[in-house]
Amino acid sequence: MLRRNFLRVGAPAMILGCRSLSLILTKAKKLNVLVLGGTNFVGPAVVNAAVRAGHSVTLFNRGISNPQLFSSLELITGDREKGVEAYQPLTKFHWDVVIDVWPEKSYMVDEATRTLAGHADYYVFISSIAVYQNFQEVGINEESNVIDLPLDRSNWGYAEEKLASELHVQKRFENRHTILRPGPITGWRDPAFDLYYWCTKLRRGGEVIAPGSGMDFLQFIDVKDVGRFCTIAAERHHNSIYNMTGPEPELITWKDFLRKASGHLDSGTDLIWVDEDFLAQHNVRSFSDLPLWAPLSEDRGFMQISSKKLLATGFKLTPVEQTLDDCLQWSTESGRNDLKFGTETDGVGLDREKELKLLQQWKESQG
């Protein structure tokens, strides 16, 4: 199953609370940071990390999405969809670093890098593991093959736009850029509610479908880690590409993850491990009906991406327990703690009625 589009981060978020961010940075000089975007999901994590590190941050966006965020910071209003002219106000200044948290289309990165190349020292771009060619490959690293870019742009999707954006950054900011390739991003302000699905199931108790044998692998990265490493890359000029996957330095299985999460949440849930073939026969879809689950039989390497290069810098991942807590707290603060999973309103996951029916059928099939 093709996973690339599931990595897309796009839904608008709500109100930011004051969150503390622990950084592993040594004392660095104060940077003049320009953040393109900055007010949805990944953006606030980037801004918080840079501010926490003592840097001067200016935002560039339309001033429409969550305008109440970061009211104390400088905002230069501009709409990237309106072309190169939108960036002209930015050329009045010199920026130590530009952090681009990803517009919808690569032409916007083309225009931004072309305009700012002579007005900024460094460029950090958040890309995605979606650019890799073969998710059957185990241990994909930064040197692994990426997808081809068709000449016909009408056939481009998320992955193609990401890769084209990377190429624009590399061309215009040669030897002065960092490109991050995260896997699934979750945590504070997550609009996808995929990790929150499992938090909710575990807290509610009762019998819950757990996917497959429990021996499939699971990877995701805390959004705060993406924000922190953007700042680290800007300070240290890590001129390179880095995969960003977690939640732990070593691979973890679903069985390991759900046991750890159950213990942390003091869960009374009874996890029922339901065979992968049975789930497929009953039209239970991986990654959507059972969020974040990518069985080895489908895309063997999707949840075995290598982050060795990232970890070799000394970067420390956020503990998975903190990510779980952030998901739960954000759902409460954003008023979304009553999601009805698997419904027309909230499509992620399995609705409870269907889950119970499947569990009964599974038990009957086991005699």
Image (tube, rainbow, N blue to C red):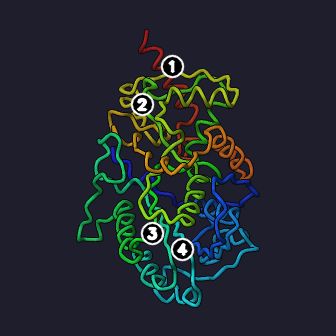
Q: Residue flagged by tag 2: what amino acid is it?
A: Asp
Image coords of residue 108 (percent x, y): 44, 76
Spot the residue most to the top.
Answer: 367
User: Label 1, on which residue?
Assistant: 360
**Label 4 crowd bin: few (<14), some (14–19), many (20+), radius 10 Å:** many
**272 or 85: nearer the eye?**
85
Image quarter of residue 60: bottom right
Q: Is residue 45 above or below residue 316?
A: below
Q: Residue flagged by tag 4: what amino acid is it?
A: Val
**Label 3 crowd bin: few (<14), some (14–19), many (20+), radius 10 Å:** many
- What residue is drawn where x is 59% and y is 39%? 197
Mark 3–mark 4 distance (CA, rounded to whole Å): 9 Å
Mark 2–mark 1 distance (CA, rounded to whole Å): 23 Å
Between disc 3 and disc 4, the foreground one is 3
**Which disc is residue 216 wearing?**
2
Q: Dividing the image into 4 quarters, which one contains the N terminus?
A: top left
Image coords of residue 339 (percent x, y): 64, 44
Between disc 2 and disc 1, the foreground one is 2
**Which disc is residue 177 wearing?**
3
Circle nearer the N terminus (1, 3): 3
Q: Residue flagged by tag 1: what amino acid is it?
A: Gln
Q: Residue flagged by tag 3: what amino acid is it?
A: His
**Which disc is residue 98 wearing?**
4
